[in-house]
Structures are given as C-alpha cells and as structure tokens.
Image (spheres, rainbow, N blue to C red):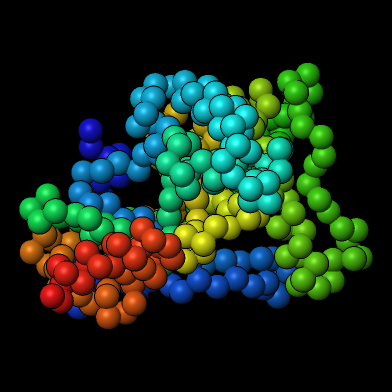
C-alpha cells in the first residue's frame, strides 16, 4: 500500500546533500511574543528502512481493521494485570496514566497506537539504516514533520471537540475545562507557559480516552498529536524520542493525519530519500558523530549492536 503523502520527496544522493537539507530545517525553539502568545518551531523525524513503508503504528499492523482501539484496550488490560510480576513497582506508571502505560508497552514491543519519532534527524537516519541489509530496497527514507504546525492543528481540533462536548452534555463529558488564570494574574511568560502546558496535558489525556462527542469529532476531522510520558526510560532519553498518537479510532494513522492537516498552510512534511549506494558512507559519518547503537541503546543490546557495526564498518 502506498502512503497518502506522495509529495515533498527530497533526493539525498550523499552525505553532503543530507547534511545540507537537515541544516536548513529550523532548530527547535519556543517563546512568547509581545502579545503574550506562545510560539513554537521545530521538526520531528522518523527513519524507515524502505521508502514504501507507511506511517503505521504497531497496533494497525497487528490488527488492520477499524477496531484497533478495542484491540489496544484489551492489550493494555492484559499488560497492566501482569506487569507487576515482571517489573519493579517503582518503574510502573500510575494506574490512570494511560500514556505512561502505552509507552512502557511500546518499549517492550507490545502493539500500541504510539508511533516513535525523534527530535534529531540524525537519530532517525540511524534507524533508517540500522540492521538494514544491502540491497534491501532502492532507498531508505527519513520522514520529517513540522511539530509546530502539527500542534497548531491539533490544538484547533481539540478546541472544536471541547465545543462539541459542551453541545452534548449527556455524552460522558470529562470533568474540568481549560486551566486558566485570572486575567490580572497572567502577567509573565512563565505563567502563560504554565497555563498552556496544563491545558495541553489535559487535551492529551482526553484524546487518549475520548468521550462520545469527542470521539465522533476526531473520527470526522482526524486527530494526531505529539506526546511524551512523565517517566522516561534510558532509551527514550538517549534517542531524543517523542511519540505521535492517533485519536481517531475509526481512522488509520495516515488517514487521521491527512484529515487534520488538510487546511494547514505550511509545507508541514518532508520525505528525505537516500539511495542504497550511499548508505554505507552515511553510516560511517553517523558513527563519527557518535550516533550509533551503543549511544542510542545504553544497554547490552546496544553493546552487541555497536560491535556488529564496528565489524561491518571498520574491521
């Protein structure tokens, strides 16, 4: 199946080309303008070993139906009921922390709606090359998404869903509303940032477990958002990782993303394609930048991986 996103494909024939394209992307930044409005910029990235791979979470690959949310619910119940037998209690999320539990499941390979991205294009490039066989496909690929543009559309869609919930008070509306300070209290950038972050955290929690009216709105309009659990594991931290998740239970990830972003005015995604012939050179360059298995997997698996890389690249 071909991806819905067939434009903005950027050929990168060698290391110099890909460095040049990556360096042109805006660096992550966040602040408040003179009017007190918060602004953001920055991109997130994902590596694919083949150019034909979809943006597809593991739950969709495991259960290619529109009922992936029911499958995820059952998987979450099963995992939560037995995780305490195999993990220390201090490493487990709180019972109601759905994002935290999904992140742990994702870490250990259980199917979830989470899709792994990173704030570093070079980390994504490493994953596009990692354990890839020579000649596996004509190209490897790095996807780049404008995280700020994504956030703008997600906030807009979430706000519209809030209105839909208020119009249908009988449809299990969650408690609480937008966290807000009194107007006279919002007089510092810090307070504005705190208000914005609290509202976004609440929006994420609602999107992960939407009520009836919110669920219907997301299924019509699409909803994909960026999220991070409150507890990081060493791999997530080392890889500068972040998750995207789909809030539209009757849509695939790509369908939901396309719907939500259809009115975005920016060029919000790019697909950087690297030919098979250039991959060994690029892997050596990444190794020189300290982007390799052991730096990204700070454990025994990473050690074994870096030994394989050294054998292949240097010995």
Find residue 211 and report its horizontal and vertical position in percent: 68, 27
- Residue furthest to the front in view is 85
Q: What residue do we see at 23% from left, 59% from top?
A: 129
User: Viewed as shown, does residue 290 lie left or right of 276?
Assistant: right
- Residue furthest to the bottom in view is 288
User: Viewed as shown, does residue 81 lie left or right of 18?
Assistant: right
Find residue 72 and report its horizontal and vertical position in percent: 51, 28
Q: Quadrant of the N terminus?
A: top left
Q: What residue do we see at 60% from left, 71% from top?
A: 30
User: Viewed as shown, does residue 170 lie left or right of 18?
Assistant: right
Find residue 81 and report its horizontal and vertical position in percent: 62, 29
Find residue 205 and report its horizontal and vertical position in percent: 67, 41
Task: Give the image quarter of residue 101.
Answer: top right
Closer to the camera, 147 or 261?
147
Closer to the camera, 230 or 42?
230
Task: Give the image quarter of residue 304.
Answer: bottom left
User: Viewed as shown, does residue 6 lie left or right of 159?
Assistant: left
How many numbered callouts?
A: 0
Q: Is residue 45 visible?
A: yes
Q: What residue do we see at 54% from left, 23% from top?
A: 74
Q: Quadrant of the C terminus?
A: bottom left
Q: Is residue 282 visible?
A: no
**Image height check: is 116 above or below 70?**
below
**Image height check: is 9 above or below 37?**
above
Q: What residue do we see at 77% from left, 71% from top?
A: 190
């Amino acid at each position: 199946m071909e991806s819905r996103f067939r434009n903005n494909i950027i050929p990168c024939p060698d290391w110099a080309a890909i460095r040049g394209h990556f360096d042109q992307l805006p660096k992550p930044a966040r602040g408040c303008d003179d009017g007190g409005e918060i602004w953001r910029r920055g991109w997130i990235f994902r590596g694919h070993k083949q150019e034909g791979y979809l943006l597809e979470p593991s739950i969709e690959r495991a259960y290619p139906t529109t009922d992936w949310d029911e499958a995820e619910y059952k998987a979450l119940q099963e995992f939560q009921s037995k995780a305490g037998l195999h993990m220390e209690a201090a490493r487990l999320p709180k019972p109601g922390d759905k994002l935290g539990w999904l992140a742990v499941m994702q870490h250990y390979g259980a199917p979830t709606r989470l899709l792994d991205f990173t704030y570093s294009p070079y980390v994504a490039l490493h994953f596009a090359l990692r354990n890839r066989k020579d000649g596996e496909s004509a190209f490897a690929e790095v996807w780049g998404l404008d995280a700020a543009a994504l956030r703008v559309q997600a906030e807009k869609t979430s706000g519209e869903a809030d209105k839909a919930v208020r119009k249908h008070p009988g449809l299990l509306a969650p408690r609480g509303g937008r966290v807000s300070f009194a107007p006279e209290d919002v007089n510092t950038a810090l307070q504005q940032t705190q208000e914005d972050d609290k509202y976004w955290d609440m929006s994420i929690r609602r999107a992960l477990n939407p009520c009836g009216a919110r669920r219907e709105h997301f299924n019509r309009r699409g909803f994909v958002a960026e999220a991070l659990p409150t507890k990081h594991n060493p791999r997530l931290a080392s890889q500068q990782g972040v998750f995207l998740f789909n809030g539209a239970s009757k849509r695939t990830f790509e369908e939901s993303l396309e719907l939500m972003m259809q009115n975005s005015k920016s060029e919000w995604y790019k697909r950087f394609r690297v030919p098979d012939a250039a991959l060994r050179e690029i892997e050596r360059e990444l190794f020189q930048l300290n982007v390799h298995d052991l730096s990204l997997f700070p454990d025994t698996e990473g050690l074994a991986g870096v030994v394989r890389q050294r054998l292949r690249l240097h010995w």
